[in-house]
Amino acid sequence: MIKRKKENLDEVYALGQHIRMSAHKARRVIDQIRGRSYEETLMILELMPYRACYPILKLVYSAAANASHNMGFKEANLVISKAQVNEGAAAKRLKPRARGRSYLIKRPTCHITIVLKDISF
């Protein structure tokens, strides 16, 4: 059975896949912005010192652009209703070690979803 997501007319989203970052490190930033307004989120992400802030900031900008262009929402009325981080596939690399051995290095990736909701309704 295929489950289909019901389309809400007051929500828009942006999805970033295969972002080269640990899901745990991205969740640390996502937990700070969940439930906040769009302008407040931009200020928080620009001032936080973490490397995870830049791809999340790009996703928030993208979701806001989707909201204004596709749905006609105003950016002042947008709130982050849902933000989640899922683990992606780990890129596996081999590092040469002593005596001809090799050591496996896993480079984690993550998928980030940002959902914006219009509160003017």
Image: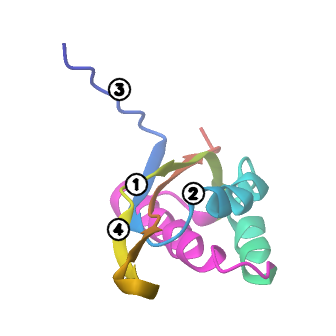
Label number found at residue 23: 2
Q: Residue furthest top?
A: 1
> Marks 2/3: CA distance?
27 Å
Label number found at residue 92: 4
Dots 1, 2 in contact, CB < 8 A: yes
Q: How is the image coloured?
A: rainbow
Mark 4: amino acid: Lys
Q: Can you identify the residue that label 1 sits on?
A: 88
Residue count near mark 2 (Cα–Cα under 10 Å), binned few <14, some 14–19, many ≥20: many
> Which mark's residue is nearer the viewer, 4 or 1?
4
Q: Earlier in the sequence, mark 4 or mark 3?
A: 3
> Which mark's residue is nearer the viewer, 2 or 3?
2
Q: Earlier in the sequence, mark 2 or mark 3?
A: 3
Mark 2: amino acid: Ala
Mark 3: amino acid: Lys
Q: Secondary structure at mark 1?
A: loop
